[in-house]
Structure formats: C-alpha cells, structure tokens
Image (cartoon, rainbow, N blue to C red):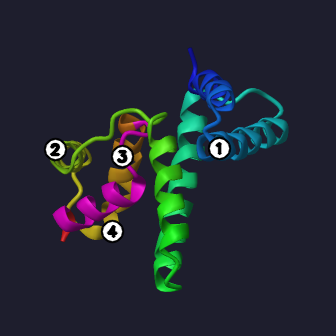
Amino acid sequence: MTIKEKMDLSLKDAMRSGDVIRRDILRVVLTNLKLAEVEKGAPLDDIAVISALQKEIKIHNESIREAEKANRPDLANQYRQEMKILEVFLPEQMNELEIHDLVLSAINDVGATTPLDLGKVMKVVTPKTEGRASNSDISRIARELLS
C-alpha cells in the first residue's frame, strides 16, 4: 500500500471518528498531492509524496515559530498537532550518527577534502536517504566534516 493510499484511509477514519484536525490537514495535503499529479501528468511515487510531506512539515515548523513570535500559543499547538499527524506517514528518520556515518563514507568514496566538494557528497548521500533524512541535516553534517 502506498503512502498516499494510507493517507486516504486515514482521512476516511478521521471523517468517521470526527477528528477535525486530522481530517483537515489530510485534506490539504491530499489536495496538494493531486495538484502535483495534475502538473506532472502522472501519479506520484512514494518518494515524491515523502518529499511533499517533508515540505509541509517544514512549513509547519516555520508557522510554529511565527505563531510563538506573535504570542499565539493556540496556533502553535495546532500546527504541532498537524505536524505529528503528518510525521506518521514518513519513513523512520535517520539519527545524527547514521547520517554522520553515511556522509563520512561518501566523503571517502568521492575523495572530498574541502567544502567546495559538498555537491559531490550530496549527490552520493541524498539518494541513499530517500526521505529518511532532510537535506539540510545532511548538508550541515557534511559541512562540519569538510571544514
């Protein structure tokens, strides 16, 4: 079963149980996925769906910061709840040590020595993580190791 199918089932369950927050966030995300499919002209694979979910979670993180800055704890709490709902559909995330080991291996494989080689390292590491680690985390760790 694809991630999108799981999200559809979860939406139906939320509608049956009256879970308004889960229902609303899943409707928004599924609508965005359908728009992306129309633009692409083909169904999205799980990797594209994971990417869209990560983008939505990143937007929610920014919204939480803005809500806290505006002294709106109610909004920040709502965004946190929505984020937790979306995170359920992501594959298990890699921890810092796993990312560190993967980046270190890639640095050795491509012979990277300076921060200018960051692109080479990212090209090797990114396909191996497939949504289990954010590009910003990978980039940050790679920069630390190349400095």
Between the residue at mark 1 and the residue at mark 3, the CA separation in whole angstroms equals 29 Å
Instruction: Point out the tag, 4 or 3, that comes first from the N-terminus.
Output: 4
Relative vertical location of residue 132 with respect to residue 81 in this rendering, above or below: above
Residue neighbourhood size for the residue with mark 4, other residues' Cα within 10 Å, grouped as few (<14), some (14–19), many (≥20): few
Q: Which mark is residue 20?
A: 1
Quadrant of the frame with the N terminus: top right
Instruction: Point out the tag, 2 or 4, that comes first from the N-terminus.
Output: 2
Instruction: Point out the tag, 1 or 4, that comes first from the N-terminus.
Output: 1
Query: Helix, strand, or loop for circle 3?
Result: loop
Residue picked out by circle 4: 116
Residue picked out by circle 2: 101
Q: Residue at x 66, y 39 (%)?
A: 23
Residue 42 falls inside the magenta stretch: no
Query: Helix, strand, or loop for circle 4?
Result: helix
Judge from the rendering whether residue 90 lies leftward or rightward of residue 31; answer left or right.
left
Between the residue at mark 2 and the residue at mark 4, the CA separation in whole angstroms equals 20 Å
Between the residue at mark 4 and the residue at mark 3, the CA separation in whole angstroms equals 22 Å
Between the residue at mark 1 and the residue at mark 2, the CA separation in whole angstroms equals 41 Å
Residue neighbourhood size for the residue with mark 1, other residues' Cα within 10 Å, grouped as few (<14), some (14–19), many (≥20): few
Q: Residue at x 58, y 53 (%)?
A: 56
Q: Amino acid at mark 4?
A: Leu
Q: Nearer the viewer, residue 59 or 126?
A: 59
Instruction: Point out the tag, 3 or 2, that comes first from the N-terminus.
Output: 2
Pair 1/4: label in front: 1
**Magenta residues?**
130-145
* Position of residue 3 measured from the top left corner of the image (x, y, whole percent): 56, 26
Residue picked out by circle 3: 133
Q: Amino acid at mark 1?
A: Val
